[in-house]
Amino acid sequence: MTQEELKYKALMLLHNKLCQMEDQVMDVDPRLLDYYLDLQNNKLINADCTTDRHNIYEILGGLKLLRLMETYPMNLDKVHQVIRLREGEWQQNERGIWQHIKGGLKQPGTAGETYYRWQPFQVFVLTAMYGPMGWIDTKVPEGQRELLPSERVNPETGTIEDLRRLCTDFTFFAPRKTDKTGLSAYNNFLFFMLEDADSTICCTANSQQQSSLLYKRTQDLIHQLDPAERRIRFTKAETNWRHGQPRQAQLLALSAGGKTKDGLFAQLCCADEFGSAPYVAGHSDMGALVNVVLSSMGPRREPMLFTSTTAGTIKSGPFMDKLDGMKRELLKEIDYATGEAQPRIEADRWMCILLQPDEWELDDETLFTSHDVRHKVNPMLGIICQHSFYDQAVADSRLDPLKRNETITKLFNVYLQAATTDWISPAEIRAIQQPMRIDDCTADKGWIVFTGMDFSKGNDLNGSSFLAYNTWNGQFFGDMDFYISEEAANASPIRELLYKWADGGWITIVPGRTFVPEWPADRIMKLNAAGVDFITFGYDAYNATMVVNILSQWVFELGLDPKQTVMPVSQKFSSYSPAVKRLDYMIKRSRDDGEGHRIPDPLIHLSMNPLWPYCFGCVKLQESSDGMGNLKPVKKDASPATKVDPVQALLSGVILYSQAESQITK
């Protein structure tokens, strides 16, 4: 099913659910109903509509909140409180224009500080964060202690359950000029004033300047309630209640790479501009800071991670991994709505609003010319952001490549990837496949084997690609063993293909919810016992798993050095590029037929596994941005149906062979 077909299905499901729940949505706030009515007003399902102003993931997020509202108790009093506390009271005049009457908190504006009324999409955000409640099993047996007012005993388990705020992780992914900082600061304010009496709120960011901006914006809100500073102490790095006050909450500003305080007891981690946090040699300072703060939340009943960010130019980072995961999970809402799968409360504890173009709108001309795309990414157009601002940015981008990059990432919220090119087609792969398996590549026939392993994502394909080299004739052969859990297979958009491949014996679907690391390790040991001579095993240095530990122990028991046999393989451009060029030559090699014609003469053949042409068809080559011309395989798109792991693992095998080549030829 294409993305457009999935979007049509999501819109129909949203429309049907809203028809059933319109009164319940209206009870929250009329603006929430306005948001949903606009969300479903799409030309794909409404013949009277000519616009398409919301992307598939925003629609799926709306569908998820309806499901949560239907499934869990709603704390409407809290939602109404957090809405009114910032905006105050408003009423419409005789012309229907909303005017501020009293109360609320002032926000910065072009004409000075003023009061703002929440927009419908912001009401959605506040409802998703503070509305749904969940009964959480504390695992404490009945009678072990007195019940709190928020607790009850589950008669089936005999344990104490606590009614808590369901959302513990919210992501606001949007471009500039959508009031991200204002919403983040207000959320900090709410935790400082209303949540745990000793709440600790951490403003985390990539730089000290960024964390200070958010910290200062939060301070300004708090200061409005204590302008004389009699109850609250304000300093450059910490805001807290003075001694003797009934609250002891504190607000901290923390930046990546700095020295994190020991003894944090955070209730809220506000990760500001997390999308610009890169991986450097497999590590992210910002990611590490966020994890330190999150690890301090253990005793909190109602913690929260609030992430607000815009896309950037980085090639990989912790937020990009999270974004991919959220998109995969949101697609499951279609299965939940149709009854094809059942959600778990753990998956319901996160929510998001992802404001970005749809995947078929990512070319420059569509981004720059479509006003529907502008509305998809920025619901504040005409409110706090002028249409002329986008017009001017687009005009400048057509003249200046650097401005183009800034416009695409920061105004259209699209991660700017390096240029990619097609590589090896499925047809070219099918031409070199032959009916042979790695089981046939035994030492008594001259074969030695180098194994690339990919076990980085437990909810996706996991396994090994084998690169066999025949020391007698110099030929290569590639095969694979890949596994996927039954739960992941059932949730995959290519479920039918996965089961077809499994029926043919080309992959293994592991029963249950999780990947079992012993299976691929046992397979390798059995192949070795049958005469397959494994030389080295390579794995991603920053995604080592239990499989690596099992194999290391095994080779140690065989009398080999694990460090020389089971080794990390770098995923950098400089490491991948020689392997890419070498594999390209091995597949595309040709020779003269003696009559002046070139005929195929591949140096490598692959097994008949249908994953080979499928996965090579999912690969593009990305060129490094350093001008060195290095190449690296990447996914052709962000679809969860795009699988490249076997190809990357095969290239790891090529890297291992290249490292050992001088010894082999001797």
Image (spheres, grey):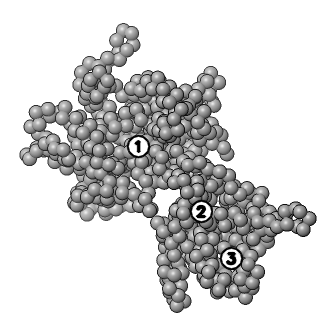
> Callout 1: 10 Å neighbours few (<14), some, many (20+)?
many
- The amino acid marked with disc number 3 is Ala
Marker disc for residue 309: 1
Q: Quadrant of the C terminus?
A: bottom right
Q: Pinpoint residue 535: horizontal percent, then vertical percent.
A: 60, 81
User: What residue sits 54% from the left and 37% below the top?
Assistant: 357
Q: Is residue 493 visible?
A: no
**Residue 159 vs residue 542, the one in the foreground:** 542
Q: Pinpoint residue 362: horizontal percent, then vertical percent.
A: 58, 39
To which residue does mark 3 refer? 468
Q: How far is mark 3 from mark 1, CA to CA? A: 45 Å
Q: Pinpoint residue 194: horizontal percent, then vertical percent.
A: 24, 41
Task: Determine whether, in the image, residue 424 is placed left or right of residue 396.
Answer: right
Task: Determine whether, in the image, residue 239 is placed left or right of residue 121.
Answer: left
Q: Is residue 103 above or below residue 647?
A: above
Q: Nearer the viewer, mark 3 or mark 1?
A: 3
> Callout 2: 10 Å neighbours few (<14), some, many (20+)?
many
Task: Determine whether, in the image, residue 526 is placed left or right of residue 252.
Answer: right
**Residue 23 vs residue 367, the one in the foreground:** 367
User: What residue sits 25% from the left and 29% below the top?
Assistant: 105
Q: Quadrant of the N terminus?
A: top right
Q: Is residue 214 above or below residue 510?
A: above
- The amino acid marked with disc number 1 is Thr
Q: How far is mark 3 from mark 2, CA to CA? A: 20 Å
To which residue does mark 2 refer? 577
- The amino acid marked with disc number 2 is Ser
The quarter holding residue 520 reads bottom right
Sequence-wise, the earlier of marks 3 and 1 is 1
Sequence-wise, the earlier of marks 2 and 1 is 1
Q: How far is mark 2 from mark 1, CA to CA? A: 32 Å
Q: Pinpoint residue 662: horizontal percent, then vertical percent.
A: 62, 80
Q: Is residue 60 above or below residue 460?
A: above
